[in-house]
Amino acid sequence: MTKEELALEIIDRLKKEYPDAGCTLDYDQAWKLLVSVRLAAQCTDARVNVVVEDLFAKYPSVDALAEAEPEEIEKIVKPCGLGHSKARDISACMRQLRDLYGGNVPDDFDALLKLPGVGRKSANLIMGDVFGKPAIVTDTHCIRLVNRFGLVDQIKEPKKVEMALWKLVPPEEGSDFCHRLVYHGRAVCTARTKPYCEKCCLADICGKCGV
């Protein structure tokens, strides 16, 4: 089958396997997701969800976090790793939201990319989860799995993977598809152990183990 056909079949099967898959970062406001996704770099979502409880309790709004000194933010977010750079980015980002956008997160991809600490992965996550717009989030699970599946050919650079997937994945499916890749990557097509191909719903069509 063509890559386009393969993509549609994978999307269909993962949809049945993980019907309720969604973002695993806890948030109830857009700015909180922006903070959490910055903290999630080289850190588990589970740890981030614990750490931000204290952060948002002390700084419950964009204005409050914008007023905080980076050093105070760093004391709280240090368990997520890279505390200094993450605190600096969060502080600068919240100040821009306050000063340029009235405390709101912009719903424009290019505007998001101009915020401190926000890359394509984070911007796509915000666009898809917060604003319901077409998005493809190329995190480590996505990159690993689509290479194994054969949807892309040994492409590791996130932007190049994203551009390749835009040609294969229907826009309305992109965000949920990427969330399902996270679930599948954690449970079955793992990184730190041998993939559990024997229990994979894609085993017969996967480029790594299919026939």
Image (cartoon, grey):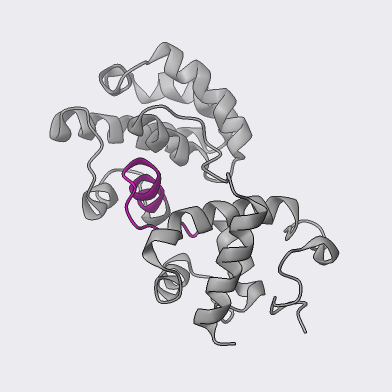
User: Is residue 136 something that shows in the picture?
Assistant: no
Residue 77, compared with residue 56, is above or below; it is below
Seen at 74% across and 51% down, the residue is: 187
Residues 192 and 211: in front is 211
User: Is residue 33 something that shows in the picture?
Assistant: yes
State the extent of the magenta-drawn residues as a range: 122-138
User: In this view, which residue lies farthest toward the right?
Assistant: 198
User: In this view, which residue lies farthest toward the bottom?
Assistant: 1
Quarter residue 78 falls in:
top right
Residue 128, compared with residue 94, is above or below; it is below
List x then y, in percent, for residue 35. Answer: 41, 33
Q: Does the magenta stretch include residue 135?
A: yes
Q: Is residue 98 left or right of residue 168?
A: left
Residue 135, compared with residue 198, is above or below; it is above
Q: Is residue 94 left or right of residue 171?
A: left
Seen at 40% across and 44% down, the residue is: 129
Residue 197, compared with residue 55, is above or below; it is below
Residues 199 and 117: in front is 199
Q: Does the magenta stretch include residue 123?
A: yes
List x then y, in percent, for residue 91. Answer: 33, 30
Q: Is residue 17 left or right of residue 146?
A: right
List x then y, in percent, for residue 201. Answer: 73, 64
Seen at 22% across and 41% down, the residue is: 106
List x then y, in percent, for residue 60. Answer: 36, 15
In what quadrant of the picture does the N terminus appear?
Answer: bottom right
Quarter residue 163 falls in:
bottom left
Residues 181 and 15: in front is 15
In what quadrant of the picture does the C terminus appear?
Answer: bottom right
How many dots with numbers?
A: 0
Seen at 75% across and 76% down, the residue is: 204
